[in-house]
Image (cartoon, rainbow, N blue to C red):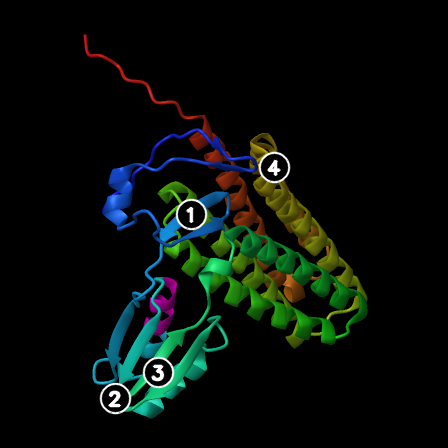
Amino acid sequence: MSESLSIMRRVIRIGERSMGVTLPREWLNLLGIDLGSLVKISIIGNSIVISPVSEETTIIRELSVDTKDLDTPDKISKIIIASYLEGLDRIVSQGDRIVIRRAFNEIFSKLPGIVLFESGKELEFRVTVDENIMNIESITKTLTNSSLMMFDLLNKYLETKDKSYLEQLFILDDDLDRLHFMGIRLIKKTLALSPSDAGDLLIAIKSLEHVGDSLDRSARMLQRISIDEKCASVASEILKLTRAYYEESLDVYHKRDFLKAIQLLNNRQSYMDSLIDLLTKSTCSNELLGFLHEALNIISIAAEISELTVSRFVREKITKKTSKSE
């Protein structure tokens, strides 16, 4: 269907133990569904999606690329990532195999389910993940928990100077990248989401991934420099305050607590001022200036998550009225 359609239906009882809803005949005709047709029923987020299933053929969405037009691994890898995010199932590549394989080496660890197949003169990038078993909510919660674990690992390093904690953090950041790509792909392939909900989810997933990037950069800065116990203590206080604001923003987002979200937005500047004060009142400005920059960046990202909570509340409260011109 070229446009989004919606209706209201009441759930009715069918038999002793089942319930159901009726579907308009014209909708079924548009989708080629009739009595006895096979359909797929999926739970995606808070939505139930019913999709027609062809027992004979499966539609494969694909793209063809040639190294004559895309002559470097970087160009091809960018196209592959974009194709993955757009929900394509296959990218057929022709031309210089060395360039194509180098492109694959750049992205295979980032994109869940992507593999490279030989097929005669062509190399095929295929996406083998099954989005039907994925769930947007589980992806966002995993991203949330992983980013909070990164805070814990960074704090453990500041307490112990044990670099194994940083190595664990870097691995977690790679996991965040993969989940981020999978989440965006799944959102773009989920027709049941409204444009507003899809937009919010994209921003939320991007925000969680950006927080991971900030923590990754903070860890790499600490890995390159040597700080004394006093500066490590200042860094821990900055991290603690940053995490508090970030975790509260996540909490109000998942609980849909718009009043707390507004309060957090009002408190954003005071949190930022407190972080700046922690550093300027110490003797660690040179060592921790970059660390402070990333902390302030995380506060800004967390505020965007709180803004999503308020925007969602407004959408849910909108009422439509028809006014007659006098």
Amino acid at pointer 2: Gly
Viewer-nearest of discs 2 and 1: 1
Drawn side of residue 164 relative to residue 33, left or right: right
Q: Which residue is mark 3?
A: 73
Q: Residue at x 67, y 75 (%)?
A: 167
Separation of marks 3 and 1 at Cα, in angstroms:
38 Å
Q: Which residues are magenta?
A: 78-85
Separation of marks 4 and 3 at Cα, in angstroms:
46 Å
Q: Secondary structure at mark 2?
A: loop
Q: Which mark is residue 49?
A: 1
Which circle's residue, 3 or 2, is located before the other in the chain?
3
Whether residue 15 can be seen here: yes
Q: Which residue is mark 2?
A: 95
Amino acid at pointer 3: Pro
Task: Name the residue nearer the viewer: 80 or 243.
Answer: 80
Q: Which residue is mark 4?
A: 267
Amino acid at pointer 1: Val
